[in-house]
Image: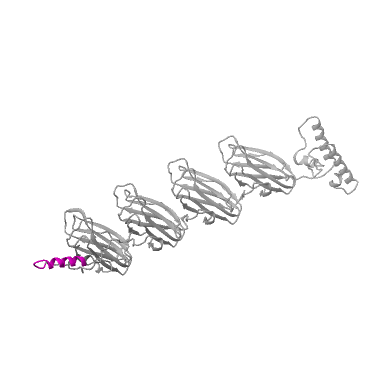
Amino acid sequence: RKGLRKMKQSSKKLLALMTAGMLCAGSLGALPAFAETEGETGENDTIETAEAIDVNTEVTGNLSSDNDVDCYKVTLQEDGTLSATFTRPSLNDYRSFWTLKLVNENNTLVQEWDIDGEGTAYRTDNEGIKAGTYYYIVSTASLHSKETYTLNVTYTPVSETTTYYEAEFNNDAESANPISVNTPYSGNIRNDNDVDYYSINLDNPGSLAIQFSTSSNEDNRDFWDIYLLDENENQIDSWKKSADNLKVTFKSIGLRSGKYYIKVTSDSLSLKDTYTIQANFTPSTDEKKFEEEHNDELSAANTFALNSSITGNIHDDKDIDYYALNLEQDGLIQFNFKHTDIEDSRDFWNYFLTDAEGNKICDWEISGTTTNQKTSKMGLQKGTYYLVVKSAFLYNDVDYIISNTFSSDGVFEAESNDTIETANKIPVATACVGNLYKNNDVDYYSFTVDKTSEVSISFNHVDLEDNRTFWNFSLLSGDENALLKQSVNGDKTNVKSDTVKLEKGTYFIKVASSYLSSDANYTLTVNAKEITYTKGDANADGSIDSTDVFEMMYSCAKKAVGRTDDLLEGENFLAADIDENGTLDSTDIFYEMLYIASKGAGVPVDWDSIVK
């Protein structure tokens, strides 16, 4: 702001008196000297000699010449509102005759008004003012008038008003006016250089929405710039306000507890109309939580409690929202992203999940017309993860609500399990929920059979209504040899693999995408039927004798001539396959006969001593 620069030279009135004296001396008779109007001292032409006046009391004066200046001093004991009524006779002239200025004790201009000759009473707007000493200065404008004026300074202490005003000077954060939330305050941008700062203290985290009101003059240009700043004056968001929009409530911003500033200024245009600003605040509750800015990086992430929701906002196209999830145990997590319909089917939001180091695990995009999107369930190992929300191809500042559902019940894949070394251990005969969250994702599982068993794998998923192949799974030995392979089409919701005999031990299942991929959840079940038999008891009658030899020889003979009926199979075949090489032949019959003969002769014998 400019300080008051125009001051009357101290010699002005002295020169006028000397001139008048010389005129008198050369006259035949004495001329009457001009007398100051009652209420003026006659020597109140500088702020140093200003006449002290009482507020809410009239004082009269006039400008004896176009160089005359009248200064009045008012002292305020507390913050309040100040206005002035300037009454004069009507000159029926629209041009400016008087200039009224309000300055502070440092002679810094607070406000200035030009008063024309058309009306009789001119009242300034209420000025929010801080306690202290101020001066009203009356001087000639573009034209001079000697008419007597009356000045009445009206003051209302802040303790006696229910209307709150900006209190100048509040041009920086240090001198910001403290304001309460949900309370309107009036202010004014007096000139291009004026800046209004307001400070707010939030005791709790919550959502802040700034409401800005002005009188409308049908001008759609932007006259006001409004900024929300953190306690270090870093910008959180900004908005513009035109004069043709009477009242606007800017989008809400989720904030942490702490101190914030609202800054009001003008850009290239200025309008001296009074504005009203109100900081509407809604605190977070257990039922409804808000994003808390700044949360634009991993280290500043908001805590995202499990089985809860958060309302957030991408307030500009560079904004990023980070949320931290702490899983104290392995579990399944699912996200639900909601927003209002913005009637545009293109993608506006991108959200993704990262590990503790910020490495992306999976991501999703959501369009402007998809108002409710649920992700597939994802199995995660215990630890810290981050959900990140940012703009996609397009930007929109509509609020979003994101929630998570977490459960540690059941059996599920737990990322990362992309290698055989990191395979998830799963029990047999129990459904395990899994997910291929991206094209190159691979899921490994391990399971153990305690005894020789017949094993198959069941694979279930929702109907994708597409008959092409989306999944491939295989059963692997410990050295990663494939014991069986199976493909799964999108329209085949229940697939069961062939059965394979597995000896006691640990095995692996690998699930991968085909040339097509889907992030739909699948359910994997290892079916294992323990094979129970007594080696050598081919007819399963509870004893090992010549009848078993007969069954073995009979089966071999039929197979030799190409017959397939009544062959030994299943557990009977396994009992007859003495050397366990998968084939029933004369060697097995020899071992069987040797075992029976040794037993009959009373020679201690077991199968390990027979089969060497």
Rendered image coloring scheme: one colour
The front one of 378 and 383 is 383
Q: Quadrant of residue 192?
A: bottom left
67 is higher (above) or lower (below) than 318: below
* Main secondary structure found in the magenta portion: helix
> Which residue does the image show at 84% across and 47% down from the upper left?
608
Which residue is nearer to you in this view: 105 or 481? 105
* Towards the viewer: 227 or 485: 227
Q: In the displayed structure, would residue 40 be above or below residue 439?
A: below
> Can you name the residue that lies furthest to the front here?
26
Q: Relative to the observer, which residue lies in front, 366 or 30? A: 30
Q: Position of residue 523 (x, y in %)?
A: 61, 44
- Is residue 25 within the magenta segment? yes
Say left or right for 589 vs 286: right
Q: Which residues are magenta?
A: 14-30
Q: Position of residue 286 (x, y in %)?
A: 47, 58
Q: Residue at the left extreme?
A: 28
Whether residue 163 is visible, yes or no, is no
Residue 164 belongs to magenta span? no
Quadrant of the snapshot with the C terminus: top right
- Residue 210, given in percent of the width and then of the height, sits at 38, 55
Q: How many marks?
A: 0
Outermost right residue: 601
Locate the N terminus and report the quarter of the image it occupies.
bottom left
Q: Is residue 29 visible?
A: yes
- In this rendering, is residue 526 above or below 117? above
In the shown orientation, is residue 333 left or right of residue 567? left
Residue 585 picture location, percent across and down: 83, 36
**Taking 558 as reference, is 519 above or below it?**
below
